[in-house]
Amino acid sequence: MDEGYLKVDAKERDLRTYSLVSLLGAIDIPTARARVGYYRPGWTPREAIKNGYMVIVNGARLINQESAQYYLFTQVYSLIMEEINKRIPADPKDQPVSLVLDEVYSLLSIPGMAQEIGRISPQYRSRKLELYIVLQALSQLSKELREQVWSIGNIMSFAVSNFEEAYELAQQIFKYNPEIVKLDFISNTQQPVLEQDRGQYLLIANDIQRMKHRECIIRRYLSEKQLDKYIRWVPITANVSVAPIHLDDIKETLLQKCGVRVRDALEKIDQRDIPVETKTITPPKIK
């Protein structure tokens, strides 16, 4: 036990204890406790990268438990980035690693994660880390990340139900064309009426909002430095052949093979006997 903790008065010890309990309360639920406290990991980033595994971190059982989501998703993210940081930039032996953040609202909405995620694209490209952010609405992003997300890389957008977000998307992806004619001239003495920037973006936002199912637009980079001068329009995404085995069946099979039941993990955790080292402090003698 920390000597400094024992030296402070009882009130200060209570305050420190309360602070620690408040922080650790995020993992004081069976699901989180089983994941953090089990004696062996189900997977490691090094193992997954070396063997080309796809690791799915599912937070469905943490619904309405935001603190636990913040802690556990951040922990997984930190473990992956710790492994990527060990790489030497531009090492040809390294294999690409895809990091997909799919509907991870509890992670993307953390203001402190904006700077962390925003620097992945420019700084970790040489370490072959490929970042994918999948979300339903821009409102799922923190304010800081919402400002940075446009510079991360390629953007693929399907229909956006919120018109204000569709308008923001139009402004960020399309450039204003000052030569688009709104009303043509009627006689030789007249000049055509040109469409103003707001009018152009309103028209584009309307189109984005009303795109059909599987219709999308794409802004892409042809290389690390060269941006495609065209915005690609895809009338319908390509069909994907259906696997003979359903994805849910594959997940269930892998869970039965590699997973550990929460109650079994908690049983092992409760059986642990961790010795606590105590140290007696002799008060100084007063002469």
Image: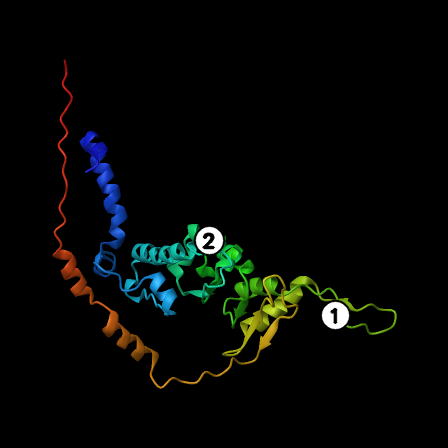
Q: How far across and down, in percent of the image, does residue 111 sit?
A: 43, 51
Tag 2 near tag 1, CB within 8 Å: no
> Mark 2 Cα within 10 Å, few/some/many (few <14, many 20+)?
many
Residue 104 in sight in this render: yes
* Label placed on residue 10: none
Task: Give the SS element for disc 2.
Answer: helix
Which residue is label 2 attached to? 114
Q: What residue is drawn where x is 47% and y is 51%? A: 115
Q: Amino acid at mark 2?
A: Ala
Q: Amino acid at mark 1?
A: Val
Q: Which of the two discs, 2 and 1, sits closer to the camera?
A: 2
Quadrant where the N terminus is found in the figure: top left
The residue sitting at the top extreme is 287
Q: What residue is drawn where x is 15% and y is 60%? A: 268
Q: What's the distance in space between the residues labelled 2 and 1, CA to CA? A: 40 Å
Task: Give the SS element for disc 1.
Answer: strand
Q: What residue is drawn where x is 39% and y is 57%? A: 83
Q: Is residue 284 above or below residue 102?
A: above
Q: How far across and down, in percent of the image, does residue 66 sit?
A: 32, 57
- Mark 2 and mark 1 lie on one chain; the one further toward the N terminus is 2
**Figure quadrant of residue 255:** bottom left
